[in-house]
Amino acid sequence: MQGPSNFFFAELGRAIHARGGSVDRIGFSLGDRLYWRRKSGRFIPCKVSPDGFAAWITQVFDDLRPTDLVMLGDGRFYHRTAIDLARSHPSAPRLHIVEHGLIRPGWLMVEPDGMGSASRIPARFSATPTEDPPAPSPARGASFATYAALDIAYHLPQMLLGPLLRPHYQSPAGLSQWSEYRGWMGKLVKRPGTGRQDRATEAALDASSGPIFLFPLQLEHDVQVTAHGGGESLRSHLKDTLIDFASNAQQNAELVIKRHPLDNGTTPWRSLISATAKDLGVMDRVHYLHGGNLDALLARAAGVVTVNSTVGLQALLAGRPCLTLGTAVYDIEGMTHQGPRDLFWTAPEAPDPDRVDKFRAFLLNHYHVPGSFDGPGARIGADALARRIME
């Protein structure tokens, strides 16, 4: 079904064909067609309205009897519907839900059950004997400039011609692509100023002697927040965290809120954070970073508060306490803070290094393949995923 906005799924089709399999690609947008190759398999365009999609995809399953169903994430309307119907269909295809790796860089995640609260990772980890991790992955992705160019080329045909040729297409984005790109242009224009603000903030943090806590923002419309965020929006989680910090942290503690690297800048995070922090009387101890060095922040962090970002797992791997506010597959006893939220600010539970190492090995052995979605690691990832599918 739908994949990343590049040629990765076309590479995957090639790799499956090379191993004797057959591939049918279901495409929805004009970008899906643009990034597919004839030699990768047959392309089946879906031109029905969302209301008619369930009947349409059921007929596809009846006709093709697929053994496997591959898609990027499980939060898109088309993917959620297809998964529900596939599980009850007589052919019952195996699911391969792919995403960026929980362990990065150089790894892709492959989920057979579902993301977030649908995942069986915590239960399976508890029942799996200790294993050695695989060798490090040499795969690397493309530069951000290449990623951006591929993304624009994927979306532009749908933006210009979609209303005429694919009028019923339901985009997975939480806002229009035009708004998305306007936000990126504004972010680019403001970059010199935000860079100066970040340097001033980092200098203030370097001069601080108190504990520093980190809240890494996710994307507001990310399905990990909207579907697996515990029923609250990202803004609500952020406000609750600021209240918790003001009420429970030491007077010399500082809170750093870091913007997601792929946030397009349309949400006025700085002003929202400043207004709340001012009302709570902690404006001088709350800091906002547009960018910043994540590794350096984790090295200094007394703890990380997150909805369910992969930064939480990075914190655990770095030996830092982590509090999750939503459903996270790494929210496991012995790893994340399991006590009351108010105690996290003064007595956070540190992760057990041995348990974290075992969890990392488990993830890599059972839920990851080496590779990336673009750049030099794309072919590595496609070949590795094809091997996993054809097992």
Image: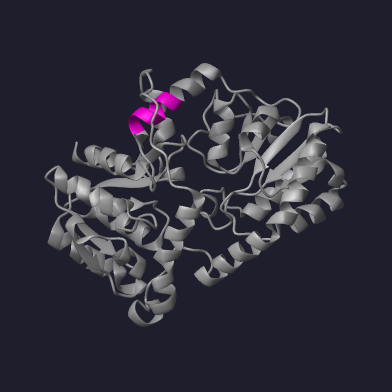
Q: Could you tell me if residue 29 is visible in this image? A: no
Q: How many marks?
A: 0
Q: What is the residue that sits farthest to the left in this orientation? A: 20
**Quadrant, the C terminus:** top left
In which quadrant of the rendered view does residue 164 lie? bottom left
| Residue situated in front as seen by the camera: 190 or 290 | 190
Of residues 62 and 190, the one drawn nearer to the viewer in this rendering: 190
- Residue 169 or residue 138, whichever sits in front: 138
> Does 156 sit above or below residue 352?
below
- Where residue 205 appears, x then y in whole percent? 79, 36
Q: Main secondary structure of the magenta part?
A: helix
Colour approach in the figure? one colour
Res. 21 in view: yes
In the picture, the quarter occupied by the N terminus is bottom left
Name the image quarter holding residue 387. Answer: top left
User: What residue is drawn where x is 41% and y is 44%?
Assistant: 118
Q: Horizontal and vertical percent for residue 77?
A: 39, 62
- Bounds of the magenta span? 360-366
Residue 256 in the figure: left or right of residue 349: right
- Position of residue 130 measured from the top left corner of the image (x, y, whole percent): 38, 17
Query: Is residue 363 magenta-colored?
Result: yes
Residue lying at 30% horizontally and 69% vertically, measured from the top left: 53
Left or right of 67? Residue 190 is: right
Percent x, y of residue 247: 81, 39
Tell me: 4 left or right of 220. left
**Is 375 on the left or on the right of 273, as rendered?**
left
